[in-house]
Amino acid sequence: MQLTAKKSLNHALLISICTPQFKGDEATESLAELARLVTTLGFKVVGTQSQRQSSTKKINVLGLGKLAEIAQLTGNKGVIEDGEEGEYLADEELTVNPSAVPLDMPSDNLPFACADVVVFDCDLSPSQLRNVENQLGVEVFDRTGIIIEIFSRHARTKTAKLQVEIARLNYVAPRLRESSCGDKERQMGKGAGETTLELNRRKVRDQLAELKRELVSVQHEMKGRRTQRSELFCVALVGYTNAGKSSMMRAITGSDVLSENKLFATLDTTVRALFPVTQPRILVSDTVGFIKKLPHDLVASFHSTLAEAQDASLLLYVVDASDPSFRSQLDVVHTVLNEVGVEDSKKLLILNKSDQLEPEQQQALMEEFPDAMMTSTLNPVDVSKLHKYIVDVAQQEMIEDEIIVPYTAKGIIGEIRSSMSVIKEEYEYSHIKLTVRSNSIDLARLKKRMLNL
Ligand SMILES: Nc1nc2c(ncn2[C@@H]2O[C@H](COP(=O)(O)OP(=O)(O)OP(=O)(O)O)[C@@H](O)[C@H]2O)c(=O)[nH]1
Ligand SMILES: [Mg+2]
């Protein structure tokens, strides 16, 4: 199942099922986030509706009244039968809080009746999805389907593509069973439908097995590369999607990593050296962003991508401090990182996008998070401040030592200068005495080599 953009722009109607689990503005914030997700896919949001329900588990997620209302907005193309109404609480309109909606979200006055896609801000079971699709007669997607589609479109490297495809097939597999085509096949005669269904299921199973095999081999290669880098000080940028991780990566490494005002712009871990370059080099990795209700399969599939964060000596938690919901976003980041087993090494909270905050707001945040660093990736002073912080932490991890290099082995000095931080050079009668700072492994290796010279 792939989202098929029948027109260049699908007009999406978003639906929030407000269960008692939602506290305060959570439903509104979540709906605003869904608006950003579907906008990332190129859809145009033409309206939002909400339905109060005691749970999202009912066969019919929408009550009869709300269903009829939405059917009108989508052009009455479906079939609503009597008695489809399930138990539900009173319904109400939900107006999206403008501060929670990104500024670039299309503001529109289009009539709702032109909605040709309906997107639910919750997960729907295969049968719920099929029911509501029949009732409305338009394409219906749930939140996971939308997230998986964004991941599919944004995956660039082989690893990311494999991981996303595995998650996509896992999502598609149970839905195959419920497809209307499957139903027709089943009606054709005993066994005939089952055969088609079985065939499709087997195809998906085979594809999954093949993809998993490929992933294991790619992960093996990745592990090898990480081992080679393991002696260097590594910093990982982690955080919610759109917080500014890639922008910060670009700023502190001088690289051209993609940063976009789109959710999930980055799906692959990129590793670059800190710039201006330090001796020894410090590596920085940019990682996949998180989102609330991230499908479990996707979390699991990104295990290997996040392995970079696992190996990092310093974790930079980047938040978009100008987003009122950044605290709950940070909770999501902590939860997912715990789930994938990223041990908390040394960490720094980065309150990014400070240029979007008033001075009083900045001050209040610094009082709330005294250990954090306030930054704007657009401000070179902030970028240098973070660069210095990273270098200082890396320096603290290093040890100082003296190395005696005889003049007969002068060639090795260049090597030392390029891989260690040389603090002092003293020229004696028969040798040069270098005071250096480096990690213990590199120092031990160098001393062993010196013995053999
Ligand atoms: N105003 C402002 N915008 C920023 C800042 N940092 C990043 N942005 C913008 O925020 C948007 C998202 O930035 P990215 O760097 O792609 O965010 P990300 O955390 O890598 O996002 P994912 O890859 O989706 O996880 C882009 O439009 C950036 O230009 C900042 O300090 N101030
Ligand atoms: Mg990014």
Image: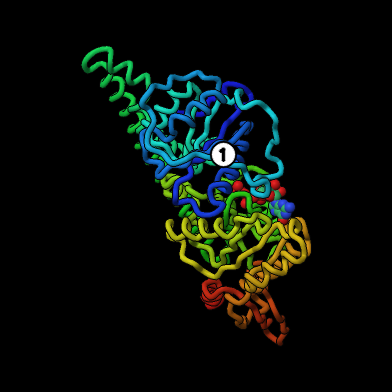
User: Around disc 1, counting alpha carbons within 10 Å, would you say few (fewer than 14), some (14 to 19), or many (20 or more)?
Assistant: few
**Residue 390 location (% of width, % of height):** 65, 68
Q: Position of residue 357 (x, y in %)?
A: 74, 59
User: Which residue is disc 1 drawn over?
Assistant: 93
Quadrant in which residue 317 is drawn: bottom right
Which secondary structure, mark 1?
loop
Residue at figure coordinates x 33%, y 16% from the top left: 184
Q: Residue furthest bottom?
A: 429
| Front residue of 34 and 58 | 58
Residue 147 visible within the image: no
Vertical order, 314 against 119 (above or below): below
Farthest-out residue, top: 188
Residue at horizontal 49 percent and vertical 26 percent from the top: 68
Asked if residue 174 is positioned above or below residue 356 in the image, the reply reads: above
In the image shown, does 332 or 120 lie closer to the viewer? 120
x, y (%) of residue 259? 67, 47
Viewer-side residue, 187 vs 65:
65
Up/down of 420 relative to 252, above or below: below
> Of the residues shown, which amino acid type is indicated by label 1?
Glu
Question: Image height check: is 194 above or below 372?
Answer: above
Image quarter hosting the N terminus? top left
Q: In this view, does 139 lie to the left or right of 256?
A: left
Tell me where residue 57 appears, x and y as whole percent. 37, 40
Left or right of residue 189: residue 291: right
The tally of labels here is 1
Colouring mode (rainbow / by chain / secondary structure / one colour): rainbow
Mark 1 CB near ligand 1 (8 Å cut): no
Q: Residue at x 63, y 24 (%)?
A: 8
At 50% from the left and 36% from the top, the residue drawn is 120
Residue 344 visible, this angle:
yes
- The extreme front residue here reads 90
